[in-house]
Image: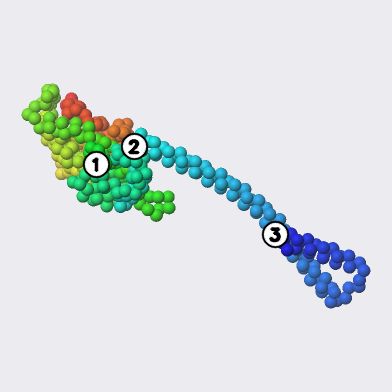
């Protein structure tokens, strides 16, 4: 018998008792029984109230369940939308775990590795890194999960049955929704052409003279430039270009080294790479501004970037007076330094 049938039976009993009251003489024992029946009647009334409340709660739960189902459908649609954006994005994106195993990869990244996306999931990315760069890749992978900022790794990628190419990996650590697994999001760029131009510029800068005459070197004699970049090749290139114009160049590889150098001397111009591990160029410019206030200095500072999507306006807002891409010609670099030093 269910709850509704039970309530119906109790109500019948109550009506029968009320009818009997009219025809019988009530004894003390019967009075006690009647009192107990009265208490039972109160309990029945309470059960009726509880039943009504339960029905109301069930209706509310049904409404909430419907809302949750609609919200879940919406989430599924949104997830599919963003997954499609990831798959068909014009840039090469992939996600790897702490061991370097590919968890997700889009079509452009898979094309660079010359394999189908479905065949790449579960494979180790290091298998596509040239052998001479694998120790560097392993070291960066071990350090990456403890770094919060976007990192730049330069490696040589060897696709399956295709020509190797110079690659720039922009790496950002993330966590899955439940926080149970560490992952790395990677944007992969083929920078073979850029590296070729950079090597050509370095080779040209090591010649006795530039192929294009420089009109301002005499104005830069004795100028002191502090240059910060974590890439040794870039430090060599910038140094070679500026030294031919009589500039004294001090190079360091990190923000910490730059601040130590500023404690020893005051350069005429500071040039800094934007994207560096640990602390980037934006962290450096904030610390330089604080140091200028402390010492009463005012040092012209320029930002240098190899990242094609780097926002010039963002660098200027951060406090840099100028911004230049690493692919710029040596004459552009010299002109920028001259202008910052007031010798243009």
The residue mark sitting in front, 1 or 3, is: 1
Q: Which residue is mark 1?
A: 158
Question: Would you identify the image quadrant in which residue 156 lies?
Answer: top left
The N terminus sits in image quarter: bottom right
Q: Is residue 237 above or below residue 216?
A: below
Q: Quadrant of the C terminus?
A: top left
Which of the 4 image quarters holds residue 198? top left
Label pair 1/2, CB-CB below 8 angstroms: no
Q: Residue furthest front?
A: 161
Residue depicted at 25% across the width and 40% down the height: 161
Q: Residue at the spot x=74%, y=65% of the render?
A: 43
Residue 65, given in percent of the width and then of the height, sits at: 59, 49
Task: Indicate the position of residue 132 as horizontal and vertical percent values.
Answer: 18, 46
209 left or right, relative to 177: left
Q: CA distance from mark 2 to mark 3?
A: 62 Å
Horizontal relation, residue 209 to residue 231: left or right: left
Secondary structure beneath disc 1? loop
Dot 1: within a 10 Å radius of its alpha carbon, few (fewer than 14), some, or many (20 or more) residues?
many
Give the residue at x 30% y 34%.
310
Which residue is nearer to you in this view: 321 or 128?
Answer: 128
**What crowding class fits label 3: few (fewer than 14 Cα within 10 Å), some (14-19), or many (20 or more)?**
few
Rendered position, 129 above or below 33:
above
Residue 304 vs residue 23, the one in the foreground: 23
Estimate the x, y position of residue 178 in percent, counting from the top left: 43, 53
Q: Which residue is mark 2?
A: 108
* Of the image marks 2 and 3, the number of the one nearer the N terminus: 3
Q: Which residue is mark 3?
A: 50
Q: Are marks 1 and 3 in contact (CB under 8 Å)?
A: no
Q: Are marks 2 and 3 in contact (CB under 8 Å)?
A: no
Depth check, front residue: 16 or 128: 128
């Amino acid at each position: 018998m269910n709850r509704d049938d039970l309530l119906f039976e109790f109500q019948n009993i109550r009506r029968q008792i009320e009818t009997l009251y009219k025809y019988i003489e009530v004894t003390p024992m019967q009075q006690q029984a009647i009192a107990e029946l009265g208490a039972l009647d109160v309990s029945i009334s309470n059960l009726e109230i509880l039943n009504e409340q339960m029905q109301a709660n069930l209706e509310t739960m049904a409404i909430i369940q419907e809302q949750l189902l609609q919200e879940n459908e919406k989430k599924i649609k949104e997830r599919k939308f963003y997954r499609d954006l990831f798959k068909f994005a014009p840039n090469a994106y992939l996600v790897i775990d702490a061991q370097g195993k590919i968890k997700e990869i889009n079509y452009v990244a898979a094309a660079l590795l010359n394999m189908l996306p479905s065949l790449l999931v579960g494979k180790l990315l290091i298998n596509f890194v040239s052998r001479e760069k694998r120790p560097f890749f392993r070291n960066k992978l071990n350090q990456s999960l403890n770094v919060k900022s976007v990192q730049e790794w330069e490696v040589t990628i060897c696709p399956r049955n295709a020509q190797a190419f110079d690659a720039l990996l922009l790496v950002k650590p993330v966590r899955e929704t439940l926080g149970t697994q560490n992952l790395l999001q990677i944007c992969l760029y083929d920078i073979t052409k850029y590296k070729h131009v950079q090597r050509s510029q370095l080779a040209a800068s090591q010649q006795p003279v530039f192929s294009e005459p420089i009109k301002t070197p005499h104005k830069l004699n004795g100028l002191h430039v502090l240059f910060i970049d974590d890439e040794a090749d870039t430090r060599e290139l910038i140094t070679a270009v500026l030294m031919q114009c009589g500039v004294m160049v001090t190079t360091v590889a990190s923000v910490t080294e730059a601040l130590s150098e500023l404690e020893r001397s005051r350069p005429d111009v500071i040039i800094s790479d934007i994207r560096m591990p640990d602390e980037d160029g934006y962290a450096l410019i904030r610390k330089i501004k604080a140091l200028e206030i402390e010492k009463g200095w005012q040092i012209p500072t320029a930002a240098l970037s190899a990242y094609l999507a780097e926002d010039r306006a963002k660098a200027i807002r951060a406090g840099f007076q100028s911004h230049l891409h690493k692919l710029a010609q040596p004459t552009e670099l010299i002109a920028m330094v001259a202008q910052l030093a007031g010798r243009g």
